[in-house]
Amino acid sequence: MALLVEKTSSGREYKVKDMSQADFGRLELELAEVEMPGLMACRTEFGPSQPFKGARITGSLHMTIQTAVLIETLTALGAEVRWCSCNIFSTQDHAAAAIARDSAAVFAWKGETLQEYWWCTERALDWGPGGGPDLIVDDGGDATLLIHEGVKAEEIFEKTGQVPDPTSTDNPEFQIVLTIIKEGLQVDPKKYHKMKERLVGVSEETTTGVKRLYQMQQNGTLLFPAINVNDSVTKSKFDNLYGCRHSLPDGLMRATDVMIAGKVAVVCGYGDVGKGCAAAMKTAGARVIVTEIDPICALQALMEGLQVLTLEDVVSEADIFVTTTGNKDIIMVDHMRKMKNNAIVCNIGHFDNEIDMLGLETYPGVKRITIKPQTDRWVFPETKSGIIVLAEGRLMNLGCATGHPSFVMSCSFTNQVIAQLELWNEKSSGKYEKKVYVLPKHLDEKVALLHLGKLGARLTKLSKEQSDYVSIPVEGPYKPPNYRY
């Protein structure tokens, strides 16, 4: 695909795969709105006052139907929005087309190359000569990373005239990042500094991005305030745990037509994502084994009737392997070549480095057979048997299916809207420093409350005497600030 920005008749920029899918996207978007009561409640409560009027928001988050409802909630509250996806396989092209036509600048399509992916990220951050966005909605931290790396390179260039050297790293993706920054220095050597100066803050969606933010806070390099949405109960528990219960089996069935019942399934990690995956596989009839580093998580798995073993214990026996950790180097090529024929290997943790795709791709004599997009069989020369890898080691629930259900994502994305409002409303107060914050519990509980009516729930109310007895306010918050479970 030629990397040229296109414009709608109204002059809004975009780059998507097929604008003719916009009507289809709009129909699905309208269905999703009914299943996303939190976001619709935000429109009702905040829309009339237009709190985001004058705000520029850049999003780097899976361009799905559910994200389309989030984007149109932000625009309904007055924001101007530019968006890209945070994964090369996760875009739903009809969703991208509907948003590009009707409400925001979108740069995303399913099946981007890494070069195209970072071009889209750069376009989403490009608001013209007046600097970048005021706010960022990030998922995994790539938009945040590009700004931080850009500022660092500009400072070195100003002092020494030295430009980034893409050959200084053996990471193909980071080579692209350095190339973008290097080329940008020739055009505007203060581009990312202008972005930094304008930015009010970022709200981060997922574990890996949050870890990056805390690392930058610790070493003193964080350039703007950040709200950690991931650790809100109504995000972490609902998105990661309940969402994976639906999207993992959906992705497996669409990609491989595998019958899960009776299979031996290994879930690497037993955090919220792992718990959701293990529950899904167990419910579908699989015999589930968990690998874990954390004794508390291991004990939780055992109390649910699951085995806890090492990957080496089961690598030649299991039928399905799912990585969920958010860490790197979980399943290596040496593991994969020991697996049984047609064992399925997939990732539902955030990043693409849980599975050693580079080791697999460069294994001497290995043969890749593409069965269909995002479903590949890799045959090893020694055994002539192969494994099935989904979504090239990236998020299989979005690469091979359509991600989490709309209701679950409403919980997650309502947190994003509230976090963005909090940053924007407090932009001049000094409340938020260049640190990482979590939303207070009363807002977490508000997100939950906004979703109860859809499920027919009616809450019991504390009496004044009961409130005094347990020292909990009648209207909440009911949980302490550090509560997550």
Image (cartoon, helix red, strand yellow):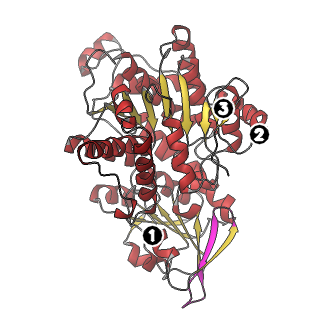
The CA distance from mark 1 to mark 2 is: 35 Å
- Residue 385 falls within the magenta-colored stretch: yes
Q: Nearer the viewer, residue 66 or 320?
A: 66
Residue drawn at (39%, 44%) of the image: 185
Residue at label 1? 356
Mark 3: amino acid: Ile
The answer to which quarter of the image holds residue 68 is top right
Mark 1: amino acid: Asp
1 or 3: tag closer to the N-terminus: 3
1 or 2: tag closer to the N-terminus: 2
Residue drawn at (51%, 79%) of the image: 339
Q: Secondary structure at mark 3?
A: helix
The answer to which quarter of the image holds residue 199 is top left
**Disc 2 residue crowd, few under 14, some 14–19, many 20+, Cα 10 Å:** some
Q: Nearer the viewer, residue 80 or 166?
A: 166
The CA distance from mark 1 to mark 3 is: 35 Å
Q: Secondary structure at mark 1?
A: loop
Q: Is residue 324 visible?
A: no
Q: Which residues are magenta?
A: 372-386
The x and y percentages for residue 360 are 50, 75
Residue at label 2? 21
